[in-house]
Amino acid sequence: MNGGRDVDIAIVGAGMAGTALALALSGQGLRLALIESRPLLAAPLPAERDVASFDTRVSALSPESVALLERLAAWPDITAYRHCPYQHMTVWDAEGTGHIEFDAADVDCAALGHIVENRAVVNALVGRLQAAGDVRVVAGKLAGLARDDDGITLSLAEGEKLRAGLLVAADGALSSVRSMMAFRTREWDYGHRALVTTVMTEQPHQHTAWQRFLPSGPLAFLPLPGESGRPVCSIVWSLQDALADEVLSLDDKAFCRRLGEAFEHRLGRVLAASPRAAFPLRQRHAVDYVQPRVALVGDAAHTIHPLAGQGINLGFKDVAALAEEVLAAHRRGRDVGQLEVLRRYQRRRKGENLLMMGAMDAFKTLFEQQALPLRWLRSAGMGAVHRAVPLKQEIMRRAMGLGG
Ligand SMILES: Cc1cc2nc3c(=O)[nH]c(=O)nc-3n(C[C@H](O)[C@H](O)[C@H](O)COP(=O)(O)OP(=O)(O)OC[C@H]3O[C@@H](n4cnc5c(N)ncnc54)[C@H](O)[C@@H]3O)c2cc1C
């Protein structure tokens, strides 16, 4: 049955989802390949802790994502480099009195989550993959696919061909596998961009994730492990396209002033900022995650508004579910590319991803409303959630991936 296949599973994309999946599948007797068009990291990361030395792409990892990285033995390398646990979260409405405070002690946890730099996560996973030694890493760009009953052939732009029993697309929001295999998606543009940068603030961040909902979109200050006396935060600021252009074009001094005002100076003045980058915000969800011999994971399957920091947390859950289904089928001697095997993965993940995306969309719409009765309802609702301890604990447990 496996005749002619170079590998059992080819994974395209060595971002956080693809590297985690390769590692989760390694050591089980499967022949694996990981294909990536950019240089893989595993190079020394900066040791300095000034604003310019942090990756502008950071993620708030839930305790459940941390547990996965622990099982993959990658978490110690991430913490040995640097990370910032946060025990509190403060969310407030710019247009009213509504606010909610979350505290790790309310759910008997040491931290609500951990802020990590994306490149540090990939680097740690690549380091473990190199140590595992059974994943063939291929430097190349996927350029073509041909599927038949017995396998799928990948053609790389560099000329190499590779035949696999299963292809997993972990190639991100603009997945080329998804378009080559004509997976249908539902998507909509928010007309917003996420501006990201790293800033130094006058006052310490208090290991708190801060989020202010402005009519123009949410603004988050996420704590990073800066030097003592030089507090550093990562910023994700969602802005309408025209406003994003305006804010991007400000000089550093004017930008820091504008950002401080938008944040109501909760951490004093913003003293310095690293170069700014902006990403278009588009919600996207594949109608199906699987076809015979193909599965989508992570951002290739779903791209979600970053306001609740759930994108890679959902992606890691995809990785865990797909790895479990594939390994169970492999142990039973089944062909892991068969649709019945892959459908089990889709059944486990699609509903939850859809629910989270719907919730983020509803949040975003609610906070954009300017009508007075809605603003009043919003403030009253936030106050009610803040006081309703069991409800607040339930929201926290779900956001932390601790189950309902
Ligand atoms: C501003 C912002 C803030 C965010 N904050 C959070 C947060 O706090 N918490 C959270 O959970 N999520 C967050 N997210 C979401 C998170 O960043 C993504 O969900 C995550 O990075 C997706 O990882 P991935 O591995 O699926 O895809 P990617 O990181 O996009 O990796 C895809 C990989 O595939 C490779 N590739 C693509 N095409 C090809 C090809 N044809 N051939 C070979 N290789 C290819 C690419 O080079 C890349 O390395 C945020 C997103 C944004 C935009």
Image: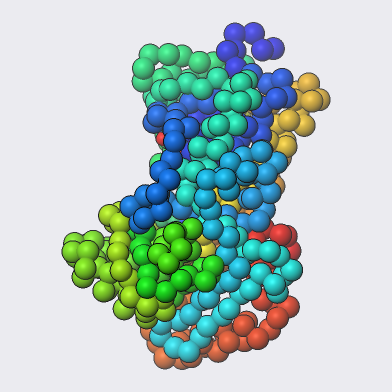
In which quadrant of the rendered image does the C terminus lie? Answer: bottom right
Say if 380 sits above or below 23 in the image: below
Colour option used: rainbow
Whether residue 110 is visible to the viewer of this picture, yes or no, is: yes
- Residue at image coords 67%, 53%: 64
- What residue sits 66% from the left and 56% below the top? 63
Of residues 180 and 370, the one drawn nearer to the viewer in this rendering:
370
Quadrant hosting residue 325: top right
Residue closer to the observer: 402 or 105 = 105
Callout count = 0
Place of residue 292 in the rendered image (x, y in percent of width and height, measured from the top left): 61, 29
Residue 314 in percent (x, y) is at 59, 51
Look at the image and tell me whether residue 147 can be seen.
no
Q: Residue 201 vs residue 290: left or right?
A: left
Q: Position of residue 1 (x, y in %)?
A: 69, 12
Measured along the vertical axis of the image, is residue 124 above or below residue 100?
above
On screen, residue 40 versus residue 11, left or right, reads left
Q: Please, which residue is most extreme toward the top here? A: 3
Residue at 53% x, 75% y is 90
Q: Residue at x 37, y 78 (%)?
A: 268
Q: Position of residue 384 (x, y in %)?
A: 62, 86
Horizontal side of 257 relative to 358 (left or right) equals left
